[in-house]
Amino acid sequence: MLTLTCPHCGIRAEETELSPGGEAHLKRYGPGDTDEAFEAYMFARKNPKGVHFERWRHAYGCGKWFLAARCTATLEVFGTYPAQTSEPPEHIIAAITAKRPGWEGYK
């Protein structure tokens, strides 16, 4: 079972206490953008086998949103951090590259 630590309240929670929110670090598109860009934002999502950045909500705890870096194949969690963070923190990137030397980054 997937277990994540909420960076806000510090509680280790199983996935049954959390609500998934999809892919993290997406660029939002507004009224001034093209239809193709908006369509890609709405419907085109990554579904990698390996390292992935996701949004989660501590639904049965503090209720706050946070981001997590994990491996979709093994459920290995590299870390969690607040949702207001625009890019993964350096310690998360370091944890990933330490275990996955050939990893090419989150973008």
Image: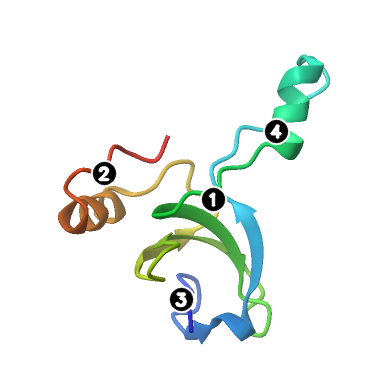
Q: Does dot 1 land on a helix, a strand or a loop?
A: loop
**Distance between the Cα atoms at labels 4 and 2?**
24 Å
- Cα separation between marks 2 and 1: 24 Å
Residues marked 2 and 3 touching at CB (< 8 Å): no
Task: Note whether 8 is above or below 21 in the view shown.
Answer: below
- Residue on which disc 2 sits: 103
Q: Amino acid at mark 2?
A: Trp
Residue labelled with disc 1: 84
Q: Is residue 53 above or below residue 44?
A: below
Q: Residues within 10 Å of mark 4 (few under 14, many from 20)?
A: some
Whether pointer 3 and pointer 1 mark residues with C-beta atoms closer than 8 Å, the reply is: no
| Secondary structure under the numbered disc 3 in the rendered image | strand
Distance between mark 1 and mark 4 Cα atoms: 19 Å
- Residue, disc 4: 41
Residue depicted at 19% across the width and 59% down the height: 99
Query: Which residue bears the numbered disc 3?
Result: 4
Q: Locate residue 98, reporting x and y percent.
A: 16, 55
